[in-house]
Amino acid sequence: MSQEVARILNALKKKIYSPVYFFYGEEPFFIDELTHWIENNVLDEAERGFNQTVVYGRDVSGREVVDLACSFPMMGNYQVIIVKEAQSTNTLEAPLLAYLKNPLKSTLLVINYKYKKLDKRKALYKTLSKSDKVVLFESARLYDNQIPAWISGRVHTLGFTISPKSVNLLAEYLGTDLGKINNELGKLIINLEPGEKITEDHIEQNIGISKEFNIFEFHKALGKRDMFHAYRILQYFEANPKQNPLQMVSVMLYTFFMKTFIYHQISRESKKSIASKLGISPFFVDDYRVAAKNYSPQQIKKIIAGLRQIDLKSKGLGSSDANSFGPLKELVLQLMS
């Protein structure tokens, strides 16, 4: 959970309400999370029947939204008006700008504006950002290197712990779709006791990512020059291409050897410093230390050149079968010799 999301939720839980909430941006997960909390917690179940209205941008005009916001609550202190998928209407700006001049304190108007950024040059953004009656939140997509920390934080929020290797397994195999990751975490914890640690066994049993035949074990085997095990893992990848697509495997292998190359230059620094510069958990630093002992910078340059060619072939350049693991298997065989 981002600090800004936590700050907004903390204020809501303390019943410190603002007349207008405008959640926008390219990452829908945080927008949905905040909207869901307001929808289910600001009013109790009895009040929601009278004082909560949920509409969708494709079904209403901006004028209709403002008319709803200008009404008063029935038998309660607040009414909640939620506009989901507000990006689907192009009539919101002018009526909302007029409403923002004097919004009702008894209304919580929640605008859920997903997949888009606001133009910061326009009046709507300028007015929203300057008003002390508005909670404006941009939900930005996380970068790849931010996903592991987000997973760890999310697991903690759910009341569990997770091993560093399990975090990285989920991050690499599930990508950057936070909604998808959150759904998979739900599968993982459904049979766990509160506070229990999520392990590779749980991930294998509930999501299907092998704890033995995965990209990190592949890196470790190559780093140790355990070519027999590396080749077995590669054969597993070839037999399960949907979960281990060639492009993902080759790109991640390229990244592994690039970081090993960098390790050679910073090997005398502290583990914490190395982890920071490589963008990895300190838990994985030893894997790069071992790999750097077994591969000189000159050898790594040759490996990286080979991986670049494999990446080009996986994209259909110079190969009749872009999905063939053959070139990667050849490269591994060359490392074995």
Image (cartoon, grey):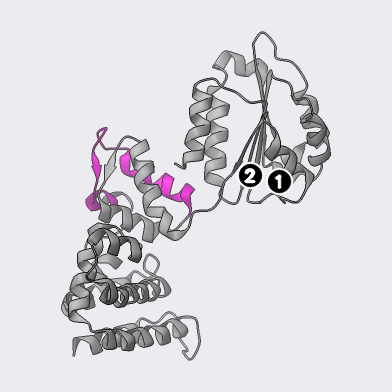
Please name whichever residue, 98 or 202, is drawn nearer the observer in this view of the structure.
98
Residues at marks 2 and 1, CA–CA distance in whole angstroms: 9 Å
Judged left or right of residue 116, residue 308 is: left
Q: Is residue 41 above or below residue 250?
A: above
Q: Which residues are magenta?
A: 177-203
The residue indicated by pointer 2 is 24
Q: Amino acid at mark 2?
A: Tyr
Crowd band around label 1 with a 10 angstrom C-alpha radius: few (<14), some (14–19), many (20+): many
Where is mark 1, residue-wise?
87
User: On the image, which quarter does residue 91 sit in?
Assistant: top right
Q: Residue at x 36, y 68 (%)?
A: 244
Is 87 on the left-hand or right-hand side of 298?
right
Identify the disc placed on residue 239: none
* Contact (Cβ within 8 Å) of mark 2 with mark 1: yes
Q: Nearer the viewer, mark 2 or mark 1?
A: 2
Is 311 magenta? The answer is no
Question: Is 312 drawn above or below residue 219 in the view shown?
Answer: below
Circle 1: residue type: Gln
Residue at position x 25%, y 35% in the image: 195
Residue nearest the viewer, comparing 190 with 103: 103
- Please provide percent x and percent y for residue 335: 23, 86
Where residue 319 appears, x then y in whole percent?
46, 89
The answer to whether residue 276 is left or right of residue 147 is: left
